[in-house]
Amino acid sequence: MYKAPVEEIAFTLNHVAGLAEAVEMGRFGDLSADLVEAILEEAGRFAGNEMAPLGEIGDRQGARLTDGKIKTPDGWPELYRHWREGGWNGLTAPEAFGGQNLPHMLNVAALEMWNSASMAFALAPTLTMGAIEALVTHGSDALKEKYLAKMVSGEWTGSMNLTEPHAGSDLGVLKTRAERRDDGTYRIFGQKIFITWGEHDVADNIIHLVLARLPDAPAGTRGISLFLVPKFLVNEDGSLGSRNDVFCHSIEHKLGIHGSPTCTMIYGDGKFGDEKGAIGWIVGEENKGLACMFTMMNNARLAVGMQGVAIAEAATQKALSYAHERTQGKAPGWSGSGMSPIIEHPDIARTLITMKALTQGARAICYACAHATDMSHHTDGDEARHWAERAALLTPIAKSFATDIGVEVASLGIQVHGGMGFIEETGAARYLRDSRIAPIYEGTNGIQAIDLVTRKLPLSSGQQVQGFIGELKQIAERISASNDTAFGETGDRLRAAIAALETTTHWLLETQAAGNAADALAGATPYQRLFGLTLTSCYLAKGALANTGDGGAEKRVALCRFMAENLLAETSALKDRVVSGAASLQAARAILA
């Protein structure tokens, strides 16, 4: 059974990502180290004791649609009520609407624990949190007054409605339409697919944020508007009124996350109400909806990255437990009676340590991204701009690398289990099934690579990424300057990986500046992994250098060295793929005809 790694999470937040220093500097008001510890401990207890057992039930039962109503797995409505009563939905929300206004770093740490316990369940509050931020940033005072308090409390949930059958990542061709009414409302007509938690039975109301196009809107993405469309209309006194003209037509039968209802939503076909059309209100300005939705999507991308970390952590725990219990053969040097536990075999040990290194590295990347976001909100002027750019640079890496790692580690977990891993009863397969959606969610990882190379590397004319690489070089130098033989060849391996990252970064910037966008994009995905592996090793090294006196230094040094000497050599091959792979890709296109 999953047990939240609270000590590891706290260490990474405080000593790798930068939370302890920010708290000490007073960046987050009265937030103290003791309060951080208390929040993490309680989140871990709830995730392990209450959520994890029901996560298994959710995977077996799934969400069920009958007569237009969805029934979530047994115990989930009660679990959601307990979760909401714990105040978890409003950790980062404004105090004016009942939130706690805590750092984003604490929220993503809690999200890791929720997703490890049950990714399918955690998707509901994840979408609500994103909807809250979109409304806080772009909603009118009237919308905030009517909806935010109950969304922050978790009494009402939120959903994000973008995708249509013909419009996946290309939102410019969406067909859902909106019509103006004289009373300031709009009528929404159309179909949305793959809507996570678009209908359910755990909360009284669902607040849909829907992208649609007005009749006179410009073509493409410039003509998209964002609308708030509640499942139930809300009366002036805040009570629920009549049913709006929106409903769930069907739910998807998915590879994983079975407990999460993934809905096809129909807006405005006359099923409810006196007139066809779902009643909605504009969020932000007409034809500026995509900018509003990106507020929600950017948070969601980091949250999806945390799903990758969470699945990797849960899969690692399960594989490690199994490897201690399962006996097979006799490992070299085994002196005990009978067969040895498989963890004694070098190949199994290598696999498990690989899982731990990748998981911890992905965690650090995501927490560092959250830290940059927090700092951008708690600083001013050039410093705020620097942190906003750092968050922008890290977001596509956090989303893509962590979700790729989630799939990779879950697959390795099955391998550790051997044939038993392919059997559903062991639970190892669930992690691989659940993890596979994350590299697709919120912009596929290929789209994240495009974003990283074309939009994020050029920030401040390339100075942001070059400055970041400079910081990584300092970590490598500190390893070498420590003269600690326990690090082995870590310093040299780190310098080589950072040099590969620097070379490919300059090549990509220069290639784009020369107008060769296709060549740059051919290497975008391997570059993204190169960046992620280098950051993993650097952040593990940063953690290994931390002198906290907690007794874990020896293990952190060993994990850092393993990563550098066993996994980091891949960066050299990735550099070659980035710089030299475009010509062969173009030459090979003919085989796809």
Image (cartoon, rainbow, N blue to C red):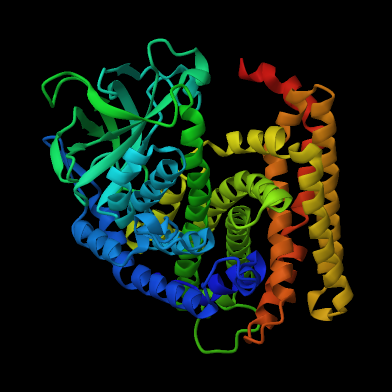
Quarter of the view holding residue 17: bottom right
Q: Quadrant of the N terminus?
A: bottom left
Q: Position of residue 169 (x, y in %)?
A: 50, 28
Q: Position of residue 288 (x, y in %)?
A: 48, 26
The answer to whether 161 appears left or right of 502 in the picture is left
Q: Quadrant of the C terminus?
A: top right
Q: Position of residue 563 (x, y in %)?
A: 71, 64
Q: Residue furthest bottom?
A: 336
Count of numbered circles in the view: 0
The answer to whether 108 appears left or right of 543 in the picture is left
Q: Position of residue 37 (x, y in %)?
A: 49, 77
Give me the residue at 46% from left, 35% from top: 293
Q: Is residue 301 visible?
A: yes
Q: Is residue 327 visible?
A: no
Above or below 84: residue 175: above
The answer to whether 43 appears left or right of 27 in the picture is left
Q: Residue furthest top?
A: 216
In the depicted view, which residue is nearer to us: 484 or 129? 129
The answer to whether 56 appears left or right of 385 in the picture is left
In the depicted view, which residue is nearer to us: 537 or 39? 39
Give me the residue at 80% from left, 37% from top: 461
